[in-house]
Image (cartoon, rainbow, N blue to C red):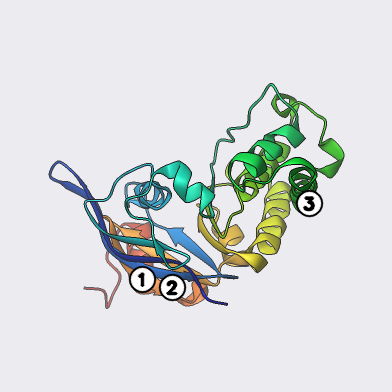
Amino acid sequence: MGTALEVRGLGKKYGAITVVDGVDFRLARGECVGVVGPNGAGKSTLFNLLDGSVVPDRGTVMLGGRDVTSTMQYQRARLGLGRAFQIPRPFVGISVADNVLAGVMHGARLQGASARRRAAEILEMVGLADRHDRLAGSLPLLDRKRLELARAVSVGSEVLLLDEIAGGLTEQEVFVVVEIVRALKRDRGVIWIEHIAHALMAVADRIMVLHFGKKIADGEPVSVMNSALVQEIYLGSPVDGVT
């Protein structure tokens, strides 16, 4: 379905500490890549580099074939990069519909009836159509997560960055989020950082593992998660055959 995002040799240091170290990967439209790794592996910094909130020291970020390495965060959003956070960040004093409409108008740059139609379509996608007039600040956690996904999509996203979006939910609620992400990835590329392994395994086409800022594995989910190297990282002790 074509390349949605390509990263080449991406690197970031803070003083003497390298937090992202020469990371390369491609993301296709219609594909979900899960990103895992222990705390401090560089996952959040990688997302910050991708969305433009942090400037890389080296490397290239290509969005839809366009070099966006030097573009600002809002410019990347307008070019089709949306991000959803573990802790939702809605405009709490306005309605659910107006939260999404703001993204549609300022990110996707639609106006009038076209903007309202698109906002309604997005709310339908995430299961919030019947809550469109609720104040965002009054929503329970699952619905706030749904709204966070809707806001990320509203900018016209070709690529979605999902930052532990299932965190804090019950098992049943996690299943709801999994189904939404599965539907969203049909038309765009998705990169998902998640500690809830079974949620990631249900949607991801590939798993990429970061460790001390380096990409140490990238492949079919079951094979990657069952590999001796990944088991060593998560168990914290050497596994036979790993060097």
Numbered circle sitting on residue 127: none
Nearer the observer, disc 3 or disc 2? Answer: 3
Reply above or below: 86 against 188.
above
Q: Which residue position holds label 1?
A: 217
SS type, badge 1: strand
Compute the Cα span from label 3 to label 2: 36 Å
Tell which tag, 1 or 3, sits nearer the viewer. 3
Q: Name the N-terminal-most of marks 1 and 3.
A: 3
Number of numbered discs present? Answer: 3
Find disc 3 in the rendering and name its residue.
121
Percent across and percent down for residue 84 are 56, 45
For the point 83% across and 43% down, the residue is: 129
Which residue is found at the position 28% from the left and 75% from the top? 240
Of the image marks 3 and 2, the number of the one nearer the N terminus:
3
The numbered mark, 2 or 1, whose residue comes first in the sequence reads 1
For mark 2, does the 10 Å Cα neighbourhood hold few (<14), some (14 to 19), or many (20 or more) residues? some
**Residue kind at label 3, given as amino acid type:** Glu
Q: Which amino acid, by three-letter code, is at mark 1?
A: Ala
Label 2 sits on what residue type?
A: Val
Q: Are marks 2 and 1 in contact (CB under 8 Å)?
A: yes
Quarter of the image where the C terminus is located:
bottom left
Check disc 2 and report its element: helix, strand or loop: helix
Q: Which residue is mark 2?
A: 224
Image quadrant in which the N terminus is located: bottom right
Horizontal relation, residue 19 to residue 161: left or right: left
Mark 2 vs mark 1: give the one in front.
1
Q: Is residue 112 left or right of residue 242?
A: right
Observer able to see residue 169: no
Judged from this view, the residue extending furthest toward the right is 130
